[in-house]
């Protein structure tokens, strides 16, 4: 499965979407729907890590995918962290945020999944 969603076993209000290899909208959408269902079941703000550390090429429509995704974010989103070392992924995420200034959730980027987990834990400790 090129894109999968799993709730974190360590942080109950955190979901992790892992993007592996070459993936597309049809791979992404069911995993994102699973995240939305997870978020809806929570009574607290939720965190999301997009783990791109093993992702291949981004789909050609990645900017429209990002817009569609953020329009459906839960209202009680605490933080999104994008994990991955790809400078291209970072550049696309930065461009997306510049173009879509209406996005209200805080989005951070880091190199590894471990750092992303630390960021969500530290964020929770200082914001709740």
Image (cartoon, rainbow, N blue to C red):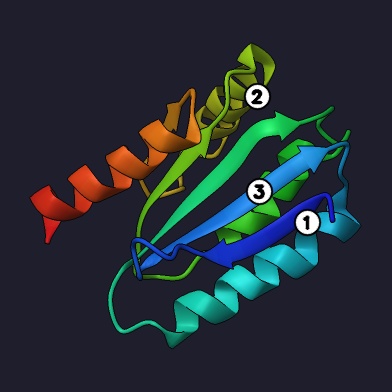
Give me the C-alpha separation between circle 1 and circle 2.
Answer: 16 Å
Residue 54: give x, y in percent of width and height: 71, 32
Residue of label 1? 28
Residue at x-position 73% and y-position 38%: 63
Query: SS for tag 3?
Result: strand
Residue of label 2? 89
Give me the C-alpha separation between circle 3 and circle 2.
Answer: 14 Å
Label 3 crowd bin: few (<14), some (14–19), many (20+), radius 10 Å: many
Label tally: 3
Q: Is residue 86 above or below residue 61?
A: above
Q: Is residue 68 above or below residue 61?
A: below
Quarter of the image where the C terminus is located: bottom left
Query: SS for tag 1?
Result: helix
Give me the C-alpha separation between circle 3 and circle 1.
Answer: 10 Å
Residue 82: give x, y in percent of width and height: 51, 37
Residue 73: give x, y in percent of width and height: 52, 64
């Amino acid at each position: 499965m090129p894109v999968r969603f799993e709730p974190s076993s360590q942080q109950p209000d955190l979901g992790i979407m892992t993007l592996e290899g070459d993936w597309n909208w049809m791979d992404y959408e069911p995993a994102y729907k699973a995240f939305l269902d997870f978020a809806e079941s929570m009574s607290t703000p939720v965190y999301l890590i997009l783990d791109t550390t093993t992702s291949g090429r981004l789909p050609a429509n990645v900017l429209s995918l990002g817009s569609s995704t953020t329009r459906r974010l839960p209202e009680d989103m605490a933080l999104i962290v994008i994990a991955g070392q790809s400078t291209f992924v970072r550049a696309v995420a930065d461009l997306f945020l510049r173009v879509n200034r209406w996005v209200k959730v805080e989005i951070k980027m880091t190199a590894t999944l471990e750092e992303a987990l630390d960021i969500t834990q530290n964020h929770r400790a200082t914001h709740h």
